[in-house]
Image: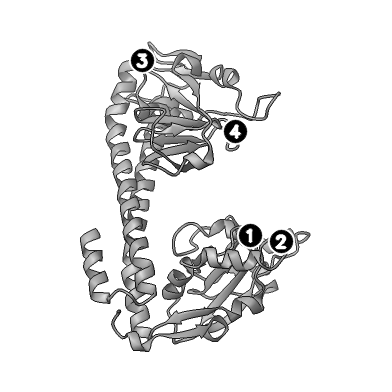
Amino acid sequence: MSDGADDWADVRVGDIGRVVTGRTPPSEQPGLFGRAYPFITPGDMRQGRYARRTERSLSPDGAAHLRRIELPPNSVCVSCIGWQMGEVIITDRPSFSNQQINTIIPNAGYEASFLYYSFRLRKQELLSLGSASGARTPIMNKSGFCGLKIRVPSLPIQRRIASILGSFDDLIEVNRRRIAVLEETARILFDEWFVYLRFHGKKDTGQVLPVRWRDGTLGDLLSLAYGRALKATDRIEGAVPVIGSSGVVGYHNQALVERSGIIVGRKGNVGSIIWSPKPFFPIDTVFFVESAYPSAYLVQLLRRMPFQNSDAAVPGLNRNAALKLPVVIPPRDVVDSFESVVAPMQALVDALHEANVRLGGSRDLLLPRLISGELSLAAAERELMAAA
């Protein structure tokens, strides 16, 4: 058992701190929205521990309008309505939320990060309780949420547990920032070389194409092959990622494409561009790219293409229309020079993504054993050192 196991107790959520249900400002008053205060919705709750980015924000007037339900830093937000029920995130500054979220503002004896990790284990439980309400949409009202119980140790142990689990998330966040810097660097380099035509130290040539550059179409550089339908029940075996237009949607035991490759969204997220560093199975909502041109160059090019939902018969990306989109085709030696600079960046991005998968897996193995008090803190700290 964990250190100090006798100190653990079951505590009602309503006794942990003040519980606040969010609210959305009136839509007929657009001046209440702005950029000053994060406005958290369930869609913002899958970015790690803290709500550092939100799709919407409130103005100072909006904050004043909802001042009674303002959330201070280190409040624990839990989604309690809809199929995103059980998502959880912590505020990192004064914030607000919509009515789908109940938020715990912890009392002095409770650590916000410990509560965050506790709720991460209870998503399915909350979804089940919400579905049992009889409503068409899963819902847990404030009184039901306040009645939930959490097993909690003493504050020093809460903090140690949160520190161990948080160390994994801190490492993941550092890697995410490195990935963002590398991807932004590659984007800027592409623009310098192939948009502004400042490559190999050359000056901007304006609207005139350099010698050996020519106008063409996307189809001159690549072809788009259809993915294949795969039943959801077949996506749970093996280690091959099954990729749709929104990203990885499952796993399979056999690859359709036996190499790394680029995936283009055909249905749903039309024109989404996904890079797979290993063999993959593209389903029928996507195309996959076949080309003799190098991948790092093509990824950057495709991310700038004005793909549109242009299929008249069935909404989606029309392959023929996509391949007819105009592009400027540079000489192959220029493309290869760009690839020699950017491909190592992409390789590092791939390695960082893999590291984050391993770190997340290690954290998720520790999480239930630490939160339940099953694993000693010393043993958990040893596992952290091994993973780091």
Pick whichever, 2 or 345, lies toward us.
2
Pick whichever, 123 or 115, lies toward us.
123
Q: Is residue 355 visible?
A: yes
Residue at image coords 50%, 70%: 93
Q: Does residue 106 appear to the left or right of 147 in the view shown?
A: left
Q: Is residue 246 visible?
A: no
In the rendered view, tell whether residue 302 sits above or below residue 133. Answer: above
Give the CA distance from mark 1 to mark 3: 46 Å
The disc placed on residue 331 is 3
What kind of residue is marked 3?
Pro
Identify the residue position indicated by label 1 in the image.
34
In percent of width and height, residue 38 lies at 57, 63
Pick whichever, 5 or 178, lies toward us.
5
What kind of residue is marked 2?
Gly
Q: Residues within 10 Å of mark 2 (few under 14, many from 20)?
A: some
The disc placed on residue 267 is 4
Name the element at disc 2.
helix
In the rendered view, tell whether residue 238 sits above or below residue 302. Answer: below
Nearer the viewer's eye, disc 3 or disc 4?
Answer: 4
Name the element at disc 4.
loop
